[in-house]
Image (cartoon, grey):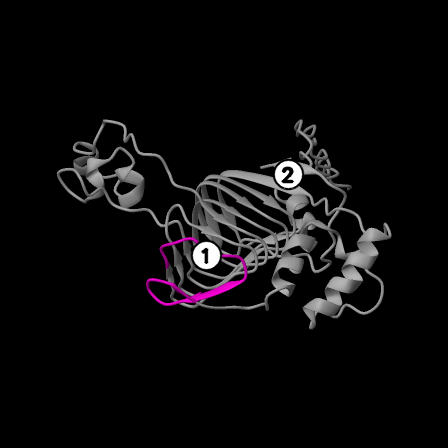
Amino acid sequence: MFGRRRREPEPAAPPVEEPPACVAPEAPPAPPAPDPLAEARAAGFLGYSGFGTIYGELTAELPFNHCDAQVFGTVNVGAFTYCNYGGEIRDATIGRYCSIGQRVIINPSGHPTGGLSTHPFVVPYGAAASGMGDVEAFRAIVADVADVGHAQRVTIGPDVWIGASAAIMPGITIGTGAIIGAAAVVTHDVAPYSVVVGAPARHLRFRLRDGLLERVLASEWWLWDLRGIPGHRDYRDPAAFLERFLAARDSGLLERLRPAVVTVRDRTLHGIVADGEGNVPDPVSMII
């Protein structure tokens, strides 16, 4: 006798796959933010690591190395000028080929001396001067009457060397080719090619002899593109250089120097570095 056949279990139904959820495709990575200083860097707007801050407006012919200088007011700088670290420049015009040493202060701000106090709270810009602009107790007492005084600009000619820790006081004019000794305090105008030292600064000597001084000054070599001078780049003998320069200029081998220009307004400059090429492009004006 055959038994009842055992019923095999039904095979399990395959799992029903849910339709994939609608997933938005990944957005492409955002393009890098434009660097407004990139063009200026390539053109020769240079700086060391660290930062410099522009409180106002800096207009510079390029190349120019601002290092980490703090700039206040309106400052104009000529091509090939460079700063060392720790400097401060306020309301000044600086010529081409200037060498500005460490911790130099050009046109230092003073303190009010004719009012109630010499503290910055007695002038409207005292918040910026003291760094207490975020302190309510200071804001409650800082002066709200405009100062009627006017900034006295400093003017520095081309090819000036300013030694470390020197101070150039307000309203001073420094002539072409002058040398300002380290730690000098310049309280009076300086003649072209004069060497001054001390505090207050006093004339020590002229760095070029009579006759040659006037000829070099009259040549205005800093206005010309020196790349057109044939032969060796030998500048040791000013008289010999002057002969080669004048011959090249008068024969039409030289062109006027037409550097690129950059204007920087109210900006902190972080770690701008040179690209290593040192090329100056065709003249261009940039505002950043």
Q: Could you tell me the amino acid type at mark 1?
A: Val
Q: Is residue 225 left or right of residue 179?
A: right
Q: Quadrant of the C terminus?
A: top right
In the picture, the disc for residue 138 is none
What is the residue that sits farthest to the bottom in this orientation?
Answer: 236
- Mark 2 secondary-structure assignment: loop
* Disc 2 target residue: 34
56 or 185, which is in the foreground?
185
Task: Tell me where residue 114 appears, x and y as whole percent.
Answer: 17, 39
Dominant secondary structure of the residues highlighted in magenta in the image? loop
Q: Which residues are magenta?
A: 186-203
- In the rendered image, which quarter is residue 176 located in? bottom right
Tell me if residue 35 can be seen.
Answer: no
Residue at image position (64%, 37%) is: 286
Q: Is residue 122 left or right of residue 8?
A: left
Q: Could you tell me the amino acid type at mark 2?
A: Pro
- Mark 1 secondary-structure assignment: loop
56 or 108, which is in the foreground?
108
In the picture, the disc for residue 190 is 1
What is the residue that sits farthest to the left in this orientation?
Answer: 116
